[in-house]
Image (cartoon, rainbow, N blue to C red):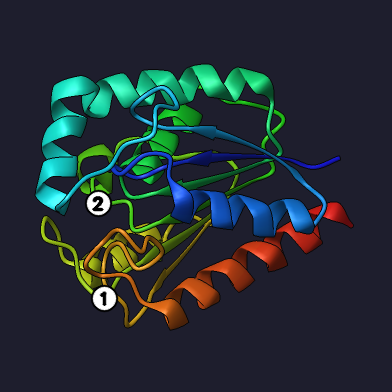
Amino acid sequence: MLKVLIATDIFGYGDVLQSLIDCLQNAGVTVQTVDPYQGRLQQFDTELSAYQAFIAQTGHDGYTQGVTQALTQQPNLAIGFSAGASALWRAVADVKPLSIKNLVLFYPGQLHLHQDKSPNIATELIFGEQEHHFNVDDMLQQLSANTTISANKTVYQHGFMNSASPAFNDVAYQYGLQRLLQVITRLKQ
């Protein structure tokens, strides 16, 4: 059975993530998650409070270490959102996990700080229309030289897959879900 690892965003595990997990499990895969809070359910009033908790409790380097540890479970597909996407980018580039066939990374906002790293496997990057820390069009241009990377910019905003985010968009969520199901179908063949 196909094994999927999901690295969450700064909001961690919650109802929204469980809904996505249920959809993926219905597609016939097993799903493991890694989040910045070691699986403890978090409730944040704002994105700022989620970010402050993330930095105080884990931080980007600590989260990358947690993601690296989760990769020892040998998933075939790894999916990341925001901080989780950036952590996967860094971890996969460093540990060379042979079991992973694909990465799908949604709006990896810290990627601009780690362009010196690059996963050596098929990687799909799905960016929002803009990022606060870098120009998405410039990033797409830089990434285009790497033949293992497919990078796309959507018309949606960073956080569009998470209903806890102010940028959540149901149409965008369905787009992202369908994209994931397509990758799963291809990997199961």
Question: Can residue 19 be spotted in the picture?
Answer: yes
Q: Amino acid at mark 1?
A: Glu
Lower sequence index among marks 1 and 2: 2
Circle number at residue 129: 1
Horizontal relation, residue 77 to residue 1: left or right:
left
Residue drawn at 45 percent across, 27 percent down: 39
**Relative to 107, does residue 95 appear above or below in the rendering?**
above
Q: Which residue lies at the image location 25% right of the left edge and 51% below the top edge?
A: 109
Left/right of residue 183 with respect to residue 146 in the rendered view: right
Mark 2: few/some/many CA within 10 Å (<14, 14-19, 20+): many
Secondary structure of the residue carrying numbered label 2: loop
Identity of the residue drawn at 16% across and 52% down: 47
Q: Quadrant of the N terminus?
A: top right
Query: In the shown orientation, is residue 70 left or right of residue 65?
Result: right
Q: Which residue is mark 2?
A: 109
- Image coordinates of residue 154 in percent, x first then y, are 37, 78
